[in-house]
Amino acid sequence: MEGAVADLSVKEIHDRLSHGVIADHDDLMGMGECLNLLERLEAAEDQEGPSRERISRIKEILNGLILEEHENPAREWEELRAQLNTLVGNMETVKGDRLTHDAGEPWPPPEKDDSDIFATLAGDYSVHSSSNFPETATQGPMPIGDPELARDFIEEAREHLASIELNMISLESSPSDTEAINAVFRPFHSIKGVSGFLNLTSFHHLSHEVENLLDSARSGSLTIDEPVIDVVLGSVDVLKILLDDLENALNGDGVLPSPSPLVEPLIEKVRELQKSQGDAAQPGTQQGPRLGSILLEKGLVDEDSIEEAARRSSDRGTRIGEELVAMGVVTESQLGEALKEQVQSREASSVRVDTQKLDNLVDMVGELVIAQSMVLQNEDVKRIKDQKLQKDMSQLGRITAELQRISLSMRMVPIRGTFQKLIRLVRDLAKKSGKEAVLEMSGEETEIDRNMVELIYEPLVHMIRNSMDHGIELPQERMKDGKPSQGKIHLSAEQKGGSILINIIDDGRGLDVDKIRRRALNREIISPGDKLDDRAIYDLIFHPGFSTKDAVTEVSGRGVGMDVVKKSVDRLRGKIEISSSLGHGSHFALKLPLTMAIIDGMIIRVGDERFIVPTIALKESLRPSSDSHFTVQNKGEMIKVRETLMPLIRLHEVFDVKPRSASPWEGLLLVVNDDNRYYGLLADEIIGRQEVVIKNLGSSLRNLKGISGGAILGDGRVALILDVKGMVSLYEEGAQ
């Protein structure tokens, strides 16, 4: 940002200062920009005498506030406001690109009084029309000042918007929840402050107007109702679009496009909504509830005093803290301590780390584990009988295992964020379809690899849409069947072993087996003679283009949703199961690995080679009897396992390896499932079960069918990880 400020002319610096760059006493970004502007102004050769002294004093106050060095920040804040007001009010007249003194031409102009300047210096644009925003609001394409800060802003803003969506939905059922209103107000306030610092005018103006709206709700002059919720959520959607535009600009030529045409109409809608419900809240009341809570916790005030101070603050347009001091309830020193606590409470207790660095750390720790295992299995080391060495090696093993656990946990994030996005989806779908539904959640604290978070969002969206459109009935239909008018969708997550289980359960109409069968017969997906149990029929909905809808709606009916779900789950090396009861609801159960970096697998031997089969794909393993082996015309070798006849896939033939035993009844059969069909993989033996770090085989072997990667075992040799779906495809192609 300093570079952007340095490129400004003195006139432009003057204009920026006169419009106000500090939102309130805790706007650290605004203070930083103000410091940069003042330093540039101070460097102007005409800035001598009182103006230079005043600039130095303002810089001193700003540095103290930023570093929290003032004993009484409230008093310093008031002096800062006064000094800035005086600086701009007495500033020399602007002529061309220079500043020259003209005592006969006072500043500000007569039509603009001191209180108006004071309002703009405090960053409160609510008293002005849109024409009072800085000129950059109407400019065309403009370069991004600081790309690194802009990228941080994008990440933080998206987190803020997700939080806003969640709390706005909760306000729909509890519109007077003060804490929820504050939880929505604060993210908008943060977005406004940082976007103003980065000179992202579209973000700044929209978030500022919504902040004013929410501030009215906090002061009690505006009621949170459906139109307010709709306009706030609409603002969230527009801000998401602006974030995408900003990200595209950063990845492109670094120049933002012209201001989005979506912003101004939405700003007008916000203003109309605020005007229709009453006057906007007075400026300067932003920290009330939070500051009051801090003072209450300290035992310095009681609730009656807070309410009285809030009333006076609203009537006079002052701050609650100022009124508490004026009432003699708290001292300036006590108020200053509370303000300092308020600022400190916002500081994050975490540090942002590039995900690529985390991935590299996990890879290196994996290499460390492998190297340690190779040392332990070295024959020369095994022959050493020194007890201290064995004790030290054991300690090394424990430390290495703990280091691997910690490094992997650093990539894990709660699934809460993904789940919370779906609350908004259910609300929007219910409004579009005329249905009543609520999304209940549990297990949101369950952690999953951050690389998988976005990958599981799409299939969850399709399944929720499926439950809303196909499952949940219209209110009158539900009441006719003796159900409550409001349907329920329960979304849950839990960790089990090395997997995460996600359940989506609705209390809708359930899956109609007969209807699915008829539609599948009409589409020639199945034949009239096919004998399928209910579970196999349920799985037909995953077939590409399959839908039981008679007409295409805005939500579904094209037969692509559940197909996407199946492909996404397969790509994540997971599986999905369906159970349903007609008239009572459906249950979709997803089983996914916790991370894509590690796989829980069964190490098998085929000849002298070792392979790894993901345990999530294994149903069972057994040694078949000789009378269970058949050869069926046009189908090849088959094996019968408990009345189920399945194809036999000889792994030694697939990989051209000499087996230790060619007869199936002398080897080991691994029963796997793919698209509700069972297959038997023939191997020589199972060596054991182990969690292994997945290694990429490189670009030349990346698309090798039947192989999903490799893993380095304890002896340093590589074992290939089998892709069951690819293995089945190879078999089917060979059979044809």
Image: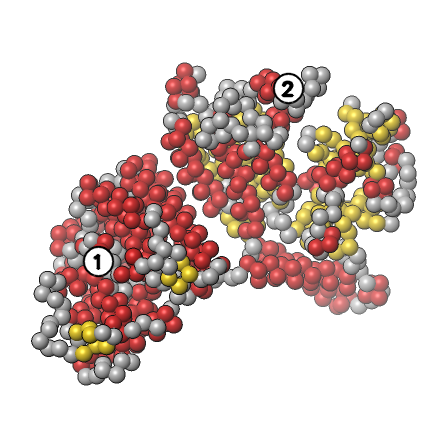
* Mark sitting earlier along the chain (1/2): 1
Q: Quick one: quadrant of the C terminus?
A: top right
Tell which of 703 and 170 is nearer to you. 703
Tell which of 604 and 143 is nearer to you. 143
Q: Quick one: quadrant of the N terminus?
A: bottom left
Identified by mark 1, the residue type is: Asn
From the viewer's perspective, tell me whether residue 80 is left or right of residue 692. left
Residue at image location 84% in from the left, 29% down from the top: 636
Residue 676 lies in quadrant:
top right
Q: Which mark is residue 185?
A: none
Tell which of 172 and 20 is nearer to you. 20
Callout 1 environment at 10 Å: few (<14), some (14 to 19), or many (20+)?
few
Percent x, y of residue 632:
85, 25
Residue at image location 30% in from the left, 57% down from the top: 137
- Look at the image and tell me whether residue 496 can be seen: no
Percent x, y of residue 677:
72, 30
Percent x, y of residue 533:
66, 21
Percent x, y of residue 710:
73, 52
Residue at image location 49% in from the left, 44% down from the top: 418
How far apart are the alpha carbons under marks 1 and 2?
67 Å
Q: Which residue is disc 2 drawn over?
A: 521
Identified by mark 2, the residue type is: Leu
Relative to residue 481, is residue 186 depicted above or below? below
Which structural element holds mark 2? helix
From the viewer's perspective, tell me whether residue 624 is left or right of residue 409. right
Q: Which residue is disc 1 drawn over?
A: 132
Relative to residue 107, is residue 50 depicted above or below? below
Relative to residue 312, is residue 28 depicted above or below? below
From the viewer's perspective, tell me whether residue 24 is left or right of residue 556. left
Residue at image location 27% in from the left, 51% down from the top: 209
